[in-house]
Image (cartoon, helix red, strand yellow):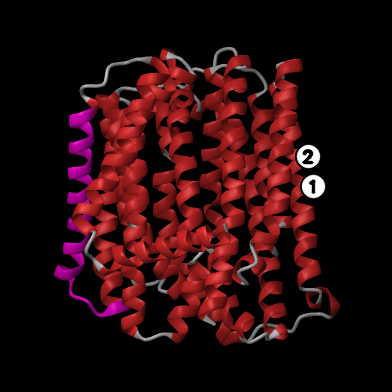
Amino acid sequence: MANERLKNTAINAAYSYLYQLLYMAIGVVSRLIFVRYLGRDYLGVNGLFSNILGVLSISELGVGTAIGFALYKPLAQNDKEKIKSIMALFRKAYFAIGSFIAVAGLILVPFLPYIIKNTTGIENLSLYYILYLINTVSGYFLSYKTTLLTSDQKEYMLKKTQMIGTLAIALVQMLVLAATRNYLLYLLSDVLIRLVMQVVMQRTADRQYPFLKKEKAEKLPRQDVQVIVRNVKALMIHNLGEVSVSQTDNLIISGFISLEMTGIVSNYVMFTTYANLFIVTALSAAIPSVGNLIAKESDEAKLAFFKTYRLLAYWLYGWMSLGFIYLSTPLVKLVFGADYVLAQSAVVLMGLVFFLRGEGSAIYNYKIAAGIYNEDKYLAFIGGIINLIASVVAVKYLGVAGVYLGTVIYSLFVVVARDIIIYRRAFGKRWLSVLSGTVRYVLFFGLSAFACSSLLHFIPEMGWGGFGIKLAILVVVPNAVLFLLEGRSPEFRYYLSIAGQTIAKLLGRK
């Protein structure tokens, strides 16, 4: 069973990485073409509308996550009737959610001029927004069955379709911009191809689970529905807080500064988004396996696994955060030009947000896989209120940096509090032992940042050559610091062992 978990995790991760690499490569190229033909204001429209619809998507309330957790056991037991009943409930829930988002999204149309500041020169904003709305809503009606494949550790079956569809969207959109410079056609091509993708993925799920369409599903027992509803309620409160953080930054920047600044920030957000996709692929591929491990292994095995998992999260997010802080602005200058550069204070705060939220993702992923939803349900909500107030106040004095200062405060609060709560619930550990682990990783990050900064100070601006030297420093120094500080830990030795076995196998094949 353990070998099967590892095999499925590896397959999911491999296909996910192929997809993410393709997504990142064509994303950078298509953004360059977008900026060249349409400029910063339209770039701001892209980011802003995505955030507005992200706020509306709070109505999802964690239904997908709760359903995914509810599917683990019947999938393991091959209980087809139970699976059918759960998916029937899921379909009804997503139909209701999609309908709500569509109606709420249309109600917002008359208020768009009050949300967006300084939109001179951009026409048809309402039409563009409606196309974004169609893209968001269609997923609730057409792709709910993909959750079943993910819970069954078969997400790799969807990646081929996603890779082909992503490539098709990018190529068609680049051709449209080069030929017409028409933003409306640019959006229409995305909507149409994405609809085809969703239909194909839905049929993939139908072929894998043909029993879903054979007979009418029985009504899910009341006690099972109550468990799902309880989990959804807990996730709803959590999601409210998360949305108030992740989806409101662009709204604050657009409302208090300008739409153009939203476009400038979006280039930096693109880097953190791509880095996050790369890391999440590694961390999330293991979530269904974690659920399996929690159900079958001892408490000691669970804790040992989590410590190893957390070290991986720290390493990847710490490394990428340092890369973002020190390399994002030089890269923006080289690729997009000096007009697209942010103040370094804002960049540092964005990097700290990325690190803190990423380092805390290990405990969050573990709690989701373990079905621990209620214990920390108010944290994100309380933190979200703190973030919103702090960001709105600080943006008036610090500009963009003020927005992310509020998010740093939120992240510190949630990461520390969640560690204390979930460790006690999952492992029975006291808060001092928990906090020591968090503080240790924050100190490691600070030492790595100091070492990198000390060396980078001597590297002048020399175009791509200077960027290459800085990149080499960022590759070597954080990993060297980690090796010196964690090299003797059981968790680090585990990864060295895995790396050694992998290299040995590769050499053996040769």
- Choose top left, top right, bottom left or bottom right for residue 337: top left
Q: Which quarter of the figure is the N terminus placed in?
A: bottom right
User: In the displayed structure, does residue 431 sit left or right of residue 365?
Assistant: left
User: In the displayed structure, does residue 341 sit left or right of residue 482?
Assistant: right
User: In the displayed structure, does residue 52 sit left or right of residue 436?
Assistant: right
Tags 2 and 1 in contact by the CB under 8 Å rule?
yes
Q: Is residue 143 above or below residue 286?
A: above
Q: In this view of the protein, can residue 144 be seen by the observer?
A: no
Q: Main secondary structure of the magenta part?
A: helix
Q: How many marks?
A: 2
Where are the magenta residues, as a range? Answer: 426-455
The residue that mark 2 highlights is: 192
Q: Nearer the viewer, residue 184 or 203?
A: 203
Q: Position of residue 323 (x, y in %)?
A: 35, 36
Q: In this view of the protein, can residue 279 be seen by the observer?
A: yes
Q: Is residue 296 above or below residue 15?
A: below
Q: Nearer the viewer, residue 176 or 219?
A: 176
111 within the magenta span: no
Q: What residue is shown at x 24% (from left), y 59% (from top)?
A: 487
Q: What residue is shown at x 70% (from left), y 66% (from top)?
A: 91
Q: What residue is shown at x 45% (from left), y 27% (from top)?
A: 254
Q: What residue is shown at x 18% (from left), y 63% (from top)?
A: 435
Q: Position of residue 156 (x, y in %)?
A: 65, 60
Element at label 1? helix
The residue that mark 1 highlights is: 196
Work out how far the residue at label 2 is from the one at label 1, CA to CA, in angstroms: 7 Å
Q: Is residue 371 above or below residue 257?
A: below
- Choose top left, top right, bottom left or bottom right for residue 132: top right
Give the amino acid at mark 2: Leu
Q: Position of residue 21 (x, y in %)?
A: 57, 43
Q: Position of residue 82 (x, y in %)?
A: 67, 84
